[in-house]
Image: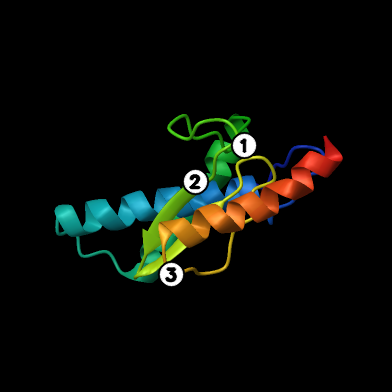
Amino acid sequence: MIRVLREGEGWDSPHLELLQSNILEQLDAENALRDLGLEAQAMESLAWALTANIQYAFDVRWSPKWVPKGSPHIWTQRGETFALCNDCLAESPALGSAKQARSWFASHRTIHEHTE
């Protein structure tokens, strides 16, 4: 497998983790929608291969255009709510509601105010 990284960025980069997670989520949706019958391990391998090839050819950075600057990306997964700081890519622990996620982000955001 080709492993080409930008200078100073390892495979544990939050940007690559988010990319791989999004690819895996899309593969999972297509697998269910089209009844492809792919096993979880096969989808994870495909997601990793796609991530590696995208990383090789493109400069990928997390930048969701649907999230206003200075706001968190908030989502619910399996009944738990999470927030992601779009500046440093820190992720909240599992929370009970979007309100709690916004509160986590407000508290987390103070870190950036002291470093800006």
Q: Nearer the viewer, mark 1 or mark 2?
A: 2
Of the two numbered discs 1 and 2 on the same chain, state the one appearing first in sequence: 1
* Residue occupying image coordinates x 43% and y 49%: 22
Residue 33, image x and y in percent? 16, 53
Label 2 belongs to which residue?
73
**Residue type at tag 1:** Tyr
Vertical arrangement, residue 115 with respect to residue 37, above or below: above
Q: Nearer the viewer, residue 114 or 83?
A: 114
Q: Few, some or many C-alpha atoms within 10 Å of disc 1 (few <14, some 14-19, many ≥20)?
A: some
**Residue type at tag 3:** Gly
Tag 3's secondary structure? loop
Is residue 1 visible in the rendered image? The answer is no
Q: Nearer the viewer, mark 1 or mark 3?
A: 3
* Residue occupying image coordinates x 38% and y 60%: 76
The C terminus, quarter of image? top right
Residue 57, image x and y in percent? 59, 31
**Residue type at tag 2:** His
Q: Nearer the viewer, mark 2 or mark 3?
A: 3
Residue 51, image x and y in percent? 53, 46
Label 1 belongs to which residue?
56
Q: Nearer the viewer, residue 1 or 46?
A: 46
